[in-house]
Image (cartoon, rainbow, N blue to C red):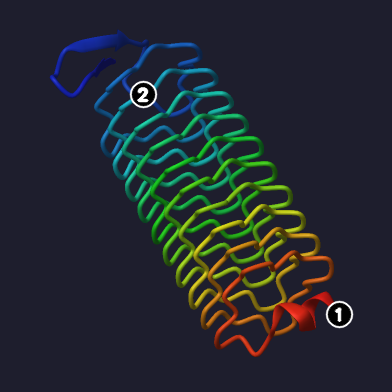
Amino acid sequence: MEIRDVTREVICTIPGDTLRDANLTDENLTRADLRGADLTDANLRETILTGANLTEANLTGANLTEADLRSANLTAAILTDADLTEANLEGANLTGANLARADLTDAILARANLSGAKLTCARLTDVDLEGANLTGANLLGANLTDAEPNDANLTDAALMGANLTRANLEGANLTDANLTAAHLTGAHLTGANLTGAILTGANLKGAILTGANLTGTGLTGDEVAG
């Protein structure tokens, strides 16, 4: 089976006629055209996919550990149960992608577009989300312990029951975000915008809210500190 780049030039040939369960470890698939491809359970460990087009691709259960996906297009891609540990997705487009239960531990998602993405129960421990766009993203029950979503846009994000213990949310925009029963113990929210955010049942013990905008939340920085 031939894999072509966006100019239709062949960049890789693999045995068989399917990409399901394919072993593409260490392959250089820069700017590969994989739109709608079925890569279920494929091994893409340390694969270079910089600038690749994976729009609507099915990567369910795929191994993308340490893969290079910088500036890749993963719009509406399915990444449920995928392993993206230490993957580099800086500047990637994940608009509307399904990352339910995906493991993104130590991944780089700085300046990535995750607007409308589904990240329910995803593992985002120690992930770099600086400046990422998570507008309207669903992070229900996600684990963001020690994550770095500083300066990220989380407007209208669903973070019910999410674990944001010690997360760095400095300068983040959480306008109208739903943080019901979220764990924000020791979180850094300096200068964050929480206008209209729902914090019912949220745990803010030890959270730093210096300069945060709490308009419409029913809370004040002094109240939380106390």
Circle 1 or circle 2, nearest the eye: 1
Residue for point 26% across, 10% down: 11
Q: As drawn, which residue projects farthest toward the front?
A: 211
Q: Which residue is mark 1?
A: 226
Q: Which type of secondary structure does the marked residue at label 1 adopt?
A: loop
Asked which secondary structure carries label 2, the reply is loop
Residue 160 picture location, percent across and down: 63, 72
| Place of residue 170 in the rendered image (x, y in percent of width and height, measured from the top left) | 61, 56
- Give the side of residue 90 with respect to residue 4, left or right: right
In the rendering, which numbered label is found on residue 79?
A: none
Give residue 86's position: percent from left, percent from top. Answer: 61, 29
Callout 2 amino acid: Thr
Quadrant of the rendered structure where residue 203 is? bottom right
Which image quadrant is residue 211 in? bottom right
Graded by Cα atoms within 10 Å as few (under 14), some (14 to 19) or many (20 or more), the crowding at tag 1 reads few
Residue for point 54% across, 46% down = 129
In the displayed orientation, state which residue is furthest to the left: 7
Q: Image point 55% across, 88% down: which residue?
A: 216
Image: 77 above or below 107: below
**Please, what is the three-letter code of the amino acid marked with disc 1?**
Gly
Residue for badge 2: 50
Q: CA distance from mark 1 to mark 2?
A: 48 Å
In the displayed structure, 215 sits above or below 143; it is below
Q: Is disc 2 surrounded by few (<14), some (14 to 19) or many (20+) residues within 10 Å?
A: many
